[in-house]
Amino acid sequence: MSELSRRELIRIAEDMNEISNDETRHFISRIVDDLSKLKPSIAFVGQIKAGKSRLINGFTGQAGYLPSDVNPWTTVITDMHFGHPSGRTSGAEFHFFDNRQWKALIAEGEELRNMFPDDEDSYKREMIEEQVEAMKTRARLRLGESYEQLLGQRHDLEELTSEDLARYVCAGDDPADDGERDPGSDRGLYSDITRKAEVFFEIGHFPFPVTVTDTPGVNDPLLIREEISRQYLKESDFFVVVLSAHQALSRADLKLFRLMQALELGQIVVFINRVDELGGGAEDADKVKADVVEGLENALGNSEIDVLVGSAQWAHYALTGDESGIDHDQVLAWLRAHPEQMNQYLSGVQEIKQGPGPISREAILRYAAMIASGLPDLRHHVTQALANGPRSEQMRMAWQHLNGFAQGDLERSTARLRALDEERADDPSAIEGNKKLAELKTLIAEKSESITKDMDNVLANLRGVMDDTVSEAVSTVVRGSDGNSPLLSRDGETELNFGPLRERMRELVQGATQVIRQRMLSELYAVDMQSNSALRALPGWKEPVDNRMNTSAVRWFRPDTTALTRGITVELRVTWLSRLISRRSVVNRAERMIVQEFEMIGDDLIDTARGDLLDRMQTVVDHYLALLAGHLEHRAGPNGGNARAEAQQAVDRARRIVDELGSVLGPDRFEALHAEAAE
């Protein structure tokens, strides 16, 4: 399900919240909160020196953000939020340990180690306790008197530089080594007490909000850093296990995989990094990949973990232009050995060439390096897996709950409306009101028919007068007032002037519709008087304030005479030769054709006026009937009319919500997605 679907579900849920009862509102609020925070997390884990930081830079498109020339760089969990639900897109928050959290770190580590004990684990607890104490000591030396005040607190920076980041997550120099420490450097100043770093970015090239996490390496000489990585495994939805092509699937790697399997963690993909450092290129990389796949099968049994290969170094060059250690021939050879990536590269180059301006050789080389790096494939693999996995599942569950509430609300509101109608059907006042409304409808229908018949009589008379006027005026113009037709003039081409005829036709239609309008208003006024008289005869009737018929739609009617601006196609210019051959036939033919044209204009004027008048009369009548029905419903009981109106609104609102939910994820679409997830 798309990001647009998630936002639409949130909007619908918020609408539902406004009309729900307290119990339902509490549950829907939780759904809104869960959907708002729906931000899958992707953790990069693996041994130190596997190139995780540079790989993350390429994966996120944040070139050089996590420095990779410092080893080890990361000593704490670093969450990189892309499109955070809060809307924040810059800066960072750094959360500090307190004594309780340090103790929990040791205790939870003991639980994880007991799952897969080995000879080394027997002394790890003692070493980790010592290292935690060493961290506290270093922090006291670095921070001095502020150490105690900082525990359990956090720092919030609106903007973040690489120097800022280094103060919180870089190992830094040992403060005890006064001779070696740079007095002007505060790298690692807070790192020993920093529990977690959260950094905020725009959503970038991700299709939906995600969190990418950089973890301290496993198999770290400093066991506390390894312990932090292992314990964070339970916090993520997806894992990218980074292996080095030089030492893929070591004993420590296999132990990590077994632990992840035992914890029944989310989806996993393996990325074998640093293939650019293999002497045999693609051939060696294929062998390494095959060994990793076989090793996972043997160690885990029936492993379905996907294995991808690539180079964070090539991605670094593609993003920065830094050619250090880059062999372009090696990159192109890699693409030739991988047809799918080669096709992706060639298609991309064609697209780039269609853009504005010339394309440089460097741009082509950098694009080739990015495709060969495998990072676009990794990003596509991860986002697709997340979209079809936990993210989609959470959205489907939210939709199911919301749809259940909406369907229930529709059933309840429909039942309520039906019950009110049944109650009103047995209510003497309602029965009497319905009977009176039916009588008034009959009265109004009869009056409407009478008004229409009278209008048609007036318009029929107008049509006859209009035709006579047209025939007389056209004959006068075409034949000439003195008997000499302008069409037979020897002066050449002649224009016929029908301006006076057009004006006379306008006067005729305006006069006739004025008569109709006055008669219609008089009849409607009579209907209003009869209706109100009948209503006053009802027992207990109270005169409402707005019981008068609103006839403004008829009162302000003016006929549409735009048809009179239409040109006459036979206002023709007759050639001298035609005049010479048959003088009388030219005049007769022109007169006949012009009369037909003006008669059609007259018909259009009359038909348009009739249609407009009927529409306006119907508008007045419909509004008046609705007004009467409302007054009679209100009379059915102290809250009878209001209750039914409110019940109808509730039904309409519930049906709208059900329809909107169906458009986000209807039954057919839901079943298809459910089948996809099952596969």
Image (cartoon, rainbow, N blue to C red):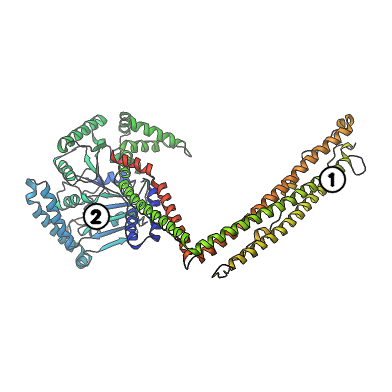
Q: Mark 2 points at which residue?
A: 169
**Amino acid type, mark 2:** Val
Q: What element carries label 1?
A: helix
- Whole-percent x and y of residue 201? 35, 52
Q: What element carries label 2?
A: helix
| Residue that appears at 35% across and 43% down | 670
Residue 162 % position (x, y): 30, 54
Q: Is residue 652 left or right of residue 111?
A: right
**Nearer-the-camera pick, 58 or 583:** 583
Tell me if 459 is positioned left or right of 306 in this view. Answer: right
Tell me if mark 2 has few (under 14), some (14-19) or many (20+) residues whose alpha carbon lies within 10 angstroms of its own. Answer: many
* Type of amino acid under label 1: Ala
Name the mark on residue 473. 1
User: Image check: 589 left or right of 334?
Assistant: right
The image quarter in which residue 368 lies: top left
- How many marks on residues? 2
Residue 307 seen in render: yes
Marker disc for residue 676? none
Quadrant of the drawing holding the N terminus: top left
The answer to whether residue 533 is left or right of residue 229 is right
Residue 524 in percent (x, y) is at: 66, 60
Q: Along the line of sight, which residue is nearer the eye, 320 or 535?
A: 535
First-in-chain label (1 vs 2): 2
Q: In the picture, which quadrant includes the C terminus?
A: top left
Disc 1/disc 2 C-alpha distance (Å): 98 Å
Q: Can residue 68 be seen in this view?
A: no
Question: Relative to the observer, which residue lies in front, 178 or 93?
Answer: 93
In percent of width and height, residue 593 lies at: 80, 37
Of tags 1 and 2, which is closer to the observer?
A: 1
Residue at 77 percent across and 41 percent down: it is: 597
Q: Residue at x 30, y 46 (%)?
A: 393
